[in-house]
Amino acid sequence: MDIKLYYHPQSRAFRVRWLLEELGLEYELQYVDLFAGEGNTPAYKKIQPHGCVPALEVDGKIMFETSAICHWLTDQFPDKGLAPAMDDPARMLYTQWMYYVPATIEPPLWYEFLHSKILPAEHRVPAILPFLQQKYTEVFEVLNDAYRGKAHLINRRFSTVDLMIGSMLPWKIEEVSRYPELKRLLQDVTQRSAFRRAKAEIAEQAVS
């Protein structure tokens, strides 16, 4: 399998790179300098029409959408044990939490970031911030309860669900510190060798 990951440090592409490391796959990193406008070039938009990262090229075929990539990659390598088998009853909860990340965790965090830091001041809507805070607080409470007494969310072993959720926690690390189960999860996943390899690559790229 010939794999190329279109990638930018400190983006959602990190979780795909982390997963590739967990799977022990060989792959090529193709850095896309979003700040220099490379995402908006006609050449890159043929790969990812919105000019975002990540995009994954596998044997010449392109796939985008982070969660879809992680879901698909995990299922290609069932021997790695990062997801319950299709006939495992735990597959129901695994699928639920996989979709929970982009559908429920990400939106309030991302829109708060947009309206507090990214958008020009004249386009921000400060009045929406308390609502977004309420929503991500609710999310953290649900996740904290879900992880109570568990090192991992599914089948008592690390899965792509833990990776997906763990990759979101640094987005709001000061809030996460208020939730003991999530704080423990973040400590655990960031000690994984695959996470460290992916993070080291980011640090090296940021310095270069």
Image (spheres, rainbow, N blue to C red):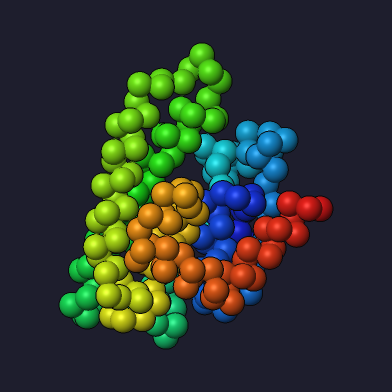
x, y percent for residue 155: 28, 80
Viewer-nearest residue: 126 or 8: 126
- Whether residue 81 appears in this view of the structure is yes
x, y percent for residue 113: 48, 35
Quarter placement of the N terminus: bottom right
| Residue at 31% across, 81% down | 156
x, y percent for residue 88: 22, 80
| Residue at 56% across, 49% down | 11
Left or right of residue 72: residue 97: left
Viewer-nearest residue: 24 or 207: 207
Left or right of residue 80: residue 49: right
Asked which quadrant contains residue 179, the reply is bottom left
Seen as rendered, the residue at the extreme right is 208
| Residue at 34% across, 37% down | 133
Q: Is residue 169 shown above or below 122?
A: below
- Whether residue 66 appears in this view of the structure is no
Left or right of residue 8: residue 91: left
Total marks drawn?
0
Seen as rendered, the residue at the extreme bottom is 79
Q: Is residue 15 shown above or below 39?
A: below
Seen as rendered, the residue at the extreme left is 89
Q: Is residue 32 shown above or below 129?
A: below
x, y percent for residue 128: 34, 25
| Residue at 74% across, 55% down | 205
Left or right of residue 24: residue 180: left
